[in-house]
Structures are given as structure tokens and as C-alpha cells.
Amino acid sequence: MLLNPLTFHTPTTISQAAELYSTLGGARILAGGTFLLNSLKLLKRKGLKTPKNVISLKRIPELVGMTADSQGLTIGSMTTIDEIFESPLLKDNFQVLRIVCRNISTQPIRNVATLGGNLTCRYTWTEMPAVMIGLEAQLHFIDNKGQASSLSAEEFYKAAAKTDKILTHVRIPRDTKAAIAYRRARKSSNVDIPLLSLLIKTYFEGNRFTKTHVSVNNCVAFAQRDQVLEQFLNAAVCSKTIAQEALDHLDKNIYDNRSDEYKQHIFRISIKGAIEELITKQAKKS
Amino acid sequence: MTTLTINNKKYDLDLKGHEILLEVLRNNLGFTGTKTACEESECGTCCVNIGGKSILSCITLACDVADKAITTIEGLADGEKLHPVQQAYIDHGAVQCGFCIPGLIMSSKALLEKNPEPTREEIDYALDGNLCRCAGYLKIYEAVIHAGKEMKQLAGTNKN
């Protein structure tokens, strides 16, 4: 057997799931399973302790689906990456999600991996955290008493993505004015080991960047903003050299300095490429 | 008791909850067409179809799909008549050692049921989770394109 014995729970409502999660100490939530099941196998192979209880969220229909209105896009936490990719609702700033989803792993993984799992598994190689910080998404939770609460993606990752609640949905504000560039660098085209996830969102006023958000993941401990780079870009005027100059204004404290030279080179050229893309798009507009 | 629906047939099984679908298919029920290889969602040899999608049975808990219709490679042929995807793989010489082929056929079928005329890029995208160590991808692409045409034609015939 690949897994150690466990008790499998199949709640049908969010409140049942939240109650189980709070009462069964050490229980693990099963969303798509792409991270959890592989990690349970690994723990077993290493002879380490494995959880006694697994709570599947697959039978809770309220957690699945997407809706959009003039203010924003709502994505249920159990919506799969493939469902997001195929959604006709990805307009305006949400269009970037199609590129993000397309870049995630492989088709059989995208068919089952969920947005909620990607955001809450606390695994390094996930794609959505930086994207959700960049899009200023709000994460919505329900606790074991049925109380709803929310916090921004940025706050969630500042707190190391820890929660004892059930993530129900994500709300992303609609934005028709932002310019967005997204980059993902991975180690190999076949095996999905990302080196960098990056989303830069800015608003051009003439040839100046304003209110720029730079969010990064994979080359940092947890997805976060590079506020040093943001400040540099917000004070800069678009020019042919600005993307190169920006590389001297990264927040050195947040990036993984233990990375080898190749990895550091890859994420530097990715950042440069994203800034150049924004400038080129803006030049075409004006 | 847990009831699994596999290839349109129901199977009552005494599952405890921790059994992986791949193990149940092969060890409990004898569906050995679904192959075991990496067991960590990298290679795609264990793909089955659930809800029209290609799913890795090595990272699926059997109890978690108790309410779903599962199709394995054994469920594709109609008696002696192979499914158009299976036939196209043979006709185009797309099978070398054959180990990856059940998974590739299940992923091809999922793609073609949604889109019988895929572009090369769409095939790349849909089959990116299925690795062939013989590297026989060109013949596989040819087989997928041909199978799509067959399936479209068959769908048209059935409509008429």
C-alpha cells in the first residue's frame, strides 16, 4: 500500500468541513490531492508520522465555480486550474489567469489541482500566491462556528499561509486600467520545477510607472512583494535602460541568496523581461 | 462498502479510505491495463478518464471518486472493435514498447472528445503530462490527428 491507514471524511457542507477540521487534531484537507497525496506517500516512505484523518472537500458544491460582475471575479476554492483556464469570464485584468493556468504543471494535474489547494498547501512550488498578491485578491474563509472572515492574499502570505479555517473563495477586483506582466521560469520544460513566479502590475501616467505592485514567489520563502523594486519603478521614467537599471534595485533581503548562479540569472532576466514587456505595451498604446 | 463504477460496471469494495485508485484498479480488480510507474504524478502512465478528463490514478483516493464514472483502457473497445484512438495508435505505428500507451490513449481520448480537430499546439498541451521514454511522439501526434478525424466522422454518422 502506498499510504498508511487513515480515516477518510467526506463532509457535504462547509460548516461540517470546518467543524471536522477544528475537532480532528492534525487532520489534513484534501482538495485536488496533487500535493497532499504525494507528500503522504513520501512521509510513509521515509517512515515519518502521517495524519490519521483526511477531509475531502470534493462533495461541497458551494466551493466550486466562478462568477463575475462589474466589480470583480469570484473563484470558488475547489475550482480546478483547468476550469479557470477554460472560463469565458477571464476578461480585463483576469486575462492573466489564463496564462498563469496554462503554465501550471501538466494536463492531468491541471484537471484536478484546485485554486484553494494551490494557495493553502504551503508548498514552495505553487503558482497562484504571487499572482493573487499581484491582483490584490481577497481570500475568504469560514471557521468552525460558521463565521466568515477575509484577508488579503498579501496578509495571508505574510502570516506564512497558516490557517485553521476553510478557504471558501477568492475575490479579485476588476481593473480595466492596470498594465500587467507575468513571468514564470522553470527548471525544465518537462518537469515542473519553477524558479520564479512574477507578476508586475502598474498604471502608466504618461511615461511614468505609478502604484506599481511587484509580487514574486519560488525564489523567496513565501510569496511577497518586492517593495524596493516597486519604489524604484514608481520613481522612474520609462526608458530603454530602465529594465536593466531595475535589476540593481531588487530587495536583496527577500530573494533566496543560496540559489545557484544560473537560478539567480534566470530570475533576473525574467524580471527584466517583464518590465520591458510593460514598457513595450505602453509604447504601442501611446 | 464503497461502490466504484468502472467501465459502466459497479464494484462493491471493502475500502478503508487510504487506498489509491491505481492500487485498487490493478490489485483488487485486475485492471492491469492502467500502468504503475513513477507513482508520483510525473509520467502519466496511470491515467484513467473521470468525468471526461484524464486523471492520474496514482494521486487519487479510490473513496474520493466513489460517485464518479471511471473509464480505464479496458473500457474503450466495443467487443473486438477497438476504439478509434486505439486503432489509430496501431495504424500509425505509435506504439513502441507500449508501456506509456494506455495513459496516452486515455489522455488522447479526453482531448478528442472535447476537440476532435486539435492543432499541434493543442495536442502538445493536452498530452504534456504523458511521457513516452521511447520518444515516439511524432507517430503519436499523427495517430491523435487521425483518430480525431475518425471520431468526428463517427459522430456525424451517428447523428445521421
Image (cartoon, coloured by chain):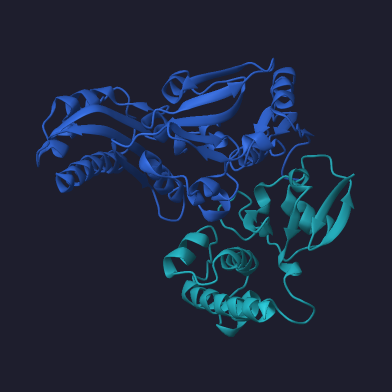
Chain colours: A blue, B cyan
Q: Position of residue B74 (x, y in %)?
A: 75, 68
Decide if residue A163 is on the left or right side of residue A133: right
Residue at 41 percent across and 23 percent down: it is A154
Residue at 24 percent across and 43 percent down: it is A269
Residue toward you, A32 or B100: A32
Instruction: Tell me if residue A245 comes above or below residue A27 in the rendering.
Output: below
Q: Position of residue A268 (x, y in %)?
A: 25, 39
Decide if residue A260 is on the left or right side of residue A22: left
Instruction: Tell me if residue A18 comes above or below residue B63 in the rendering.
Output: above
Q: Is residue A250 visible?
A: no
In the picture, which quadrant includes the N terminus of chain B? Answer: top right
In the picture, which quadrant includes the C terminus of chain B? Answer: bottom right
Residue toward you, A39 or B80: B80
Q: Where is residue A102 in the image (x, y as percent from the top left)?
A: 44, 51
Instruction: Tell me if residue B97 comes above or below residue B17 in the rendering.
Output: below
Q: Quadrant of residue A246?
A: top left
Residue at 62 percent across and 19 percent down: it is A164
Residue toward you, A238 or B1: A238
Q: Position of residue A120 (x, y in %)?
A: 54, 30
